Amino acid sequence: MSLTIKSHFASRTYLSFTTKPSRFTGYNTKIRPNSIYHFNPLRLTYYQPKKMQAPVQYSPAPLIKSSLIEPDGGALVDLVVPEGERGAKTIEAESLPKVRLTKIDVEWVHVISEGWANPLKGFMREDEYLQSLHFSSLRLKDGYVVNMSLPIVLAIDDETKERIGSSSHVGLVGPDGDLIAILRSIEIYKHNKEERIARTWGTTAPGLPYVEEVITPAGNWLIGGDLEVLKPIKYNDGLDHYRLSPKQLRKEFDRRNADAVFAFQLRNPVHNGHALLMNDTRRRLLEMGFKNPILLLHPLGGFTKADDVPLDVRMEQHSKVLEDGVLDPETTIVAIFPSPMHYAGPTEVQWHAKARINAGANFYIVGRDPAGMGHPTEKRDLYDPDHGKKVLSMAPGLEKLNILPFRVAAYDIVAKKMAFFDPSRAKDFLFISGTKMRTYARTGENPPDGFMCPGGWEVLVKYYESLQAEEATQQPAAVPS
């Protein structure tokens, strides 16, 4: 087992470890009223700048950044209107032309308002959109470049554009009719869907989940402007206590005296291969000299495709992983990342990494085919499985983030546990894909011992049993002949 440290373009450092509410009403999750880690009142720690010291001689080894990093573009934005101003702002919003939001639009309002897309202060205007679409980054007024690989935009139709007229501001209305926000100093510009799809996904093939759900039915115009969110976005699904903002996460890292934070993004249940990777990463960071590395286990909580496991089921499964001791609650923070999922591979993984910078993570774990999916019309992967980690090592605006690539873990049939894949004895390893895992759970067949903790597996089995029962009730009754 070895640790390789590589330097890219003299400014980029990354580490390479080389080793030998559910949409189904029938499922009753048991979500705790509190987080699965011990959540004490958060306190803000102020860092005092160090006095200038005489130059010292450093060793020739590459420097690994160790302190929590600054948000992109400076201080975190907070676009939620102060409580004392909400009444007046709401009255103003009621008088403005209205733009109705979809559920996914509201998720993006949530993302922007808390600073995940820092320093973005609203839905993109055209110059920001073009920079994001063509350069995967934004150049700020001071010349500083921040990564912004996904356009964060709001679409409107011809009728809404006509209704807005010459107004400089609009009110944003949620799917249930509640006023959500004001969008100020607006700019309306053409929504070229084909160009957006081609440049974001690298294909215009039919069957891309986010495209079919969001872009295809959207209007032919985009509206950008500065957001003023009337109150914090809440979902009232029993999971809001997991939705910690970047500011809250940074306070929690300070409270725990973290000297390194390594983030792991996932949209699937945690199996023991994931846990092996996360525990091994922490061990390696300790060996490098860090005193208290903290894991941010950060499942994606926005839109996902229909066959992904629903968020509430995943969160219950994650809680069992900590309960069973597979991950240590004292060194793990479990929180929900509110972004919708694009399944846009190397383009999207930059967004996932950039958002974690704003949350205070200085290490980001990336694996095989991050944010990828199968080609929607052909029997192959849509993206090269190695391109995500390669792109992260070169992406503009991500130079300050330490990238942690990892090799794939598989089930070792000799050791009867999940282990890092060893090509020299490939026949001893069994690869259990997400599809295979779902098949096991759906049919009631148990996976090999050591694949997943028993409590976590039970959550999945119960979910698929409830799904099958619901599907059975929706089958039309047979007509007797």
Image: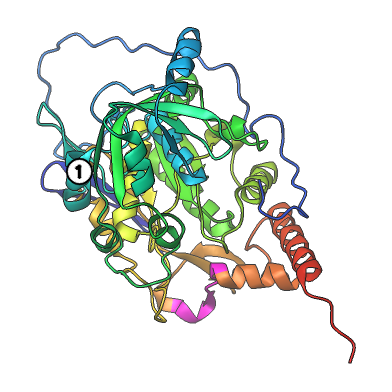
Residue 107 at x, y = what percent? 47, 40
Residue 275 at x, y = what percent? 54, 52
Name the quarter where the N terminus is drawn: bottom left
Residue 339 at x, y = what percent? 44, 43
Q: Residue at x 23, y 51 (%)?
A: 393
The question of residue 202 being in magenta is answered with no
Badge 1 amino acid: Ser
**Is the image coloured rainbow, by chain, by secondary structure, or in one colour?**
rainbow
Q: Residue at x 17, y 52 (%)?
A: 134
Say which quarter of the image contains residue 452.
bottom right
Q: Which residues are magenta?
A: 425-434
Compared to residue 430, the image places residue 409 above or below, namely above
Label 1 SS: strand
Residue bearing the label numbered 1: 137
Say which quarter of the image contains residue 363.
top left
**Residue with the most extreme right position:** 480
Q: Is residue 143 left or right of residue 96?
A: left
Observer able to see residue 288: no
Name the quarter where the C terminus is drawn: bottom right
Q: Residues within 10 Å of mark 1 (few under 14, many from 20)?
A: many
Observer able to see residue 379: yes
Q: Is residue 15 left or right of residue 260?
A: left
Residue 124 at x, y = what percent? 27, 38
Q: Residue at x 40, y 58 (%)?
A: 371
Compared to residue 450, the image places residue 119 above or below, namely above
Q: Is residue 460 left or right of residue 192?
A: right
Q: Residue at x 40, y 28 (%)?
A: 113
Pick the front one: 372 or 102: 102
Compared to residue 426, the image places residue 116 above or below, namely above
Say which quarter of the image contains residue 31.
top right
Pick the front one: 162 or 242: 162
